[in-house]
């Protein structure tokens, strides 16, 4: 769970007599998923949804031997499939807009710090190792040429974990729409996409964990035609020399994040966008992150930060439109 939870239980529909609430849940991509939608029949879409998970994993999972992303990392180029292509293109777009703060070529650094697929004893790498590894990092080192993804130099590797889960959420949402479903809430490990309304004819609601760390005491975020993603530094980290190093790696300095942010929750028109920008906003910090949102209104981003103040007090701050009603 990445700081958000599904709020409330869906009851039998009164407002849409011909429809009922269908709930599908399970495990995939190392996490959980929950899909709720209003439908006119009881035919389960679970096989189709789980087939999508498998197809995306065969393309983008670093944990699946022989996946397309692993073949790219081990070689020089691949023909991008229908799943890799939009993810890489979106990643490159976000990299340009954030001046490289979001960068899928960060994989060598993630591995160096011990947060990769093959985990090893964590500890801060030497400055020399960081500088040497940085030579293999940089979104400009990727080339998209028609259907091909190529690298400008050997040793460049990509890790799409910072964007793929949001993308998966969007793929499932589009799958539901292709089946004529217009009211749904998709949750893949805390990355959510919502459309329409619930069985009470109200926007879908999720709870936002507040500064006391208790989601049950949090605020409700209402979603309709909107997506949300959360990233945090409270689950994967290690302590060394009085400093806590988290799994978010700065792709320009090579350093693991050790700032004051606990979590940032981002809303956007789609889950892939929200998922990508939550990483960049953690690196920007609270004030710079909120200023970035103000300076890029066309992105339609909103953000909610939970952070530690200089005196250690846990505080929160959010952009003006974060809690706006749909």
Image (cartoon, rainbow, N blue to C red):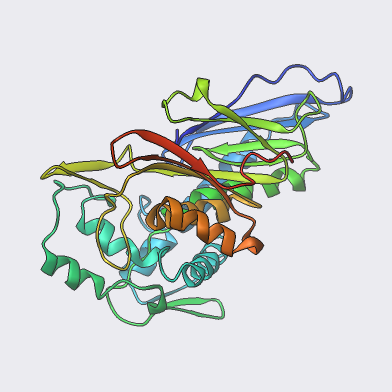
- Seen as rendered, the residue at the extreme front is 311
Left or right of 59: which side holds 200? right
**Quarter the N terminus occupies:** top left
Q: Is residue 266 above or below residue 86?
A: above
Q: Is residue 5 above or below residue 297?
A: above
Q: Where is residue 282 shown, x and y percent of the image?
A: 40, 52
Give the residue displayed 40% in from the left and 64% down from the top. 101
- Seen as rendered, the residue at the extreme right is 17
> Nearest the camera: 134 or 303?
303
Give the residue displayed 66% in from the left and 52% down from the top. 269
**Residue 41 in sight here:** yes
Left or right of 123: which side holds 235? right
Q: Is residue 270 above or below residue 305?
A: below
Q: Where is residue 84 shown, x and y percent of the image?
A: 52, 63
> Nearest the camera: 159 or 178?
159
> Nearest the camera: 324 or 87?
324
**Quarter the C terminus occupies:** top right
**Residue 82 in sight here:** no
Give the residue displayed 73% in from the left and 17% down from the top. 11
Residue 38 image-quadrant placement: top right
Q: Where is residue 314 shown, x and y percent of the image?
A: 37, 33
> Nearest the camera: 190 or 262?
262
Residue 107 image-quadrant placement: bottom left
Left or right of 206: which side holds 13? right
Residue 179 image-quadrant placement: top right
Total numbered badges shown on the rendered structure: 0
Give the residue displayed 31% in from the left and 57% down from the top. 249
Q: Where is residue 246 shown, x and y percent of the image?
A: 28, 47
């Amino acid at each position: 769970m990445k700081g958000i939870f599904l709020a409330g239980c869906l009851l039998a529909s009164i407002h849409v007599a011909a429809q009922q609430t269908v709930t599908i849940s399970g495990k995939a991509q190392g996490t959980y998923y929950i899909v709720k939608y209003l439908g006119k029949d009881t035919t389960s879409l679970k096989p189709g949804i789980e087939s999508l998970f498998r197809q995306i994993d065969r393309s983008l999972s670093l944990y699946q031997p022989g996946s397309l992303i692993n073949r790219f990392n081990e070689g020089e180029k691949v023909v991008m499939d229908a799943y890799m292509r939009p993810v890489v293109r979106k990643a490159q777009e976000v990299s340009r807009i954030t001046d490289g703060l979001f960068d899928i070529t960060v994989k060598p650094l993630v591995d160096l710090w011990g947060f990769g697929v093959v985990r090893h004893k964590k500890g801060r790498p030497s400055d020399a190792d960081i500088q040497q590894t940085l030579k293999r990092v940089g979104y400009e080192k990727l080339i998209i040429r028609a259907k091909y993804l190529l690298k400008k130099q050997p040793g460049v590797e990509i890790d799409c974990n910072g964007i793929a889960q949001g993308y998966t959420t969007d793929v499932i949402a589009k799958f539901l729409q292709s089946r004529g479903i217009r009211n749904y809430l998709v949750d893949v490990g805390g990355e959510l996409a919502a459309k329409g309304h619930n069985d009470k004819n109200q926007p879908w609601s999720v709870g936002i964990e507040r500064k006391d760390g208790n989601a049950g005491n949090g605020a409700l975020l209402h979603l309709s035609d909107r997506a949300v993603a959360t990233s945090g530094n409270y689950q994967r980290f290690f302590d060394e020399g009085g400093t806590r190093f988290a799994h978010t790696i700065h792709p320009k300095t090579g350093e693991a994040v050790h700032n004051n942010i606990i979590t940032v929750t981002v809303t956007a028109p789609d889950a892939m966008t929200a998922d990508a920008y939550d990483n960049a906003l953690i690196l920007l910090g609270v004030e710079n992150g909120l200023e970035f949102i103000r300076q890029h209104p066309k992105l339609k981003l909103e953000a909610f930060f939970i952070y530690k103040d200089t005196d250690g007090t846990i505080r929160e701050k959010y952009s003006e439109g974060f809690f706006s009603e749909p």
